[in-house]
Amino acid sequence: MLAPPAHALGAPAAGMTQRGKGFPFPCGHGQGSVTPTNWGLPGLAELWADWGDYAYLAAALWAFFEGETFVLAAAAIGATMGLVDPWLLMGSVWIGSYLGDQTWFYLGRRYGPAILRRFPKSQPKVERANQLLERYGTLFILSFRFLYGVRNVASVVCGLAGYPKLRFAVLNFIAAGVWAGSFVAAGWFLGSWLGVERLFWTICGIAATALAFFIARHFWIRGRAARGASA
């Protein structure tokens, strides 16, 4: 059984209760114990304590489908509770992210036109990603994981454009390592600085702000297009 180090959590205080594998979860203002269903990060911590090394396989699978939020949370748990090995976490999400983009690359090479016909609304993102690939080439492949708005189609676009397979595989491997190391380090630092509770709400706040921005941007673009059509 894994237990968090005493320096990370200290002794259980008022408003805290024991749950799961013997480590306390803080309860907000005496409202009772926090469970995995009503607080994401403690639920993830309990999962790690229950699953042990198998949790790293879950991290790899999550990274296969682009999961930096999961990586940030897991690294924060490692920093504050001592349940997660940062090197194993980085290695698992590195491989998961690499395999995910390799898969999309080969799907793009083999089924690219069919994918575009199946998802016509993705055409603007595809065109933007293709422009960036033509203009920046290697730099685009090394950085597209950090480019919100095009990263989900970037590997497909590289495959569709006929980018050399071996070159993409090498660059993608390097890029996946940079992405994995960056988010594990960021999560570890933020977890040590903010603590699990504040980090959880910080992530929620950032996600809500980003969602509001993209919704507002969507309606602004639609409104501008409508005004242009009526002019």
Image (cartoon, rainbow, N blue to C red):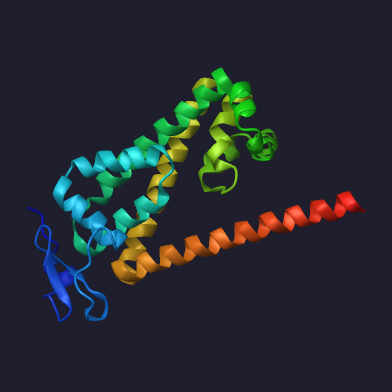
Residue 169: x and y, percent? 47, 27
Q: Is residue 89 above or below residue 112?
A: below
Q: Answer left or right for 8 relative to 120.
A: left
Residue 173: x and y, percent? 43, 33
Judge whether residue 202 can be spotted in this image.
Answer: yes
Q: Please give the name of the residue rendered at 32% of the width and 39% of the height, measured from the top-left corner.
A: 60
Q: Answer left or right for 185 relative to 84.
A: right
Q: Residue furthest right?
A: 231
Residue 151: x and y, percent? 55, 42
Q: Residue furthest left?
A: 1
Residue 25: x and y, percent? 19, 68
Looking at the image, which is closer to me, 159 or 205? 205
Q: Is residue 150 above or below residue 14?
A: above
Quadrant in which residue 43 is drawn: bottom left
Judge whether residue 91 can be spotted in this image.
Answer: no
Q: Please give the name of the residue rendered at 36% of the width and 55% of the height, measured from the top-left corner.
A: 72
So how many labels did they put on this image? 0
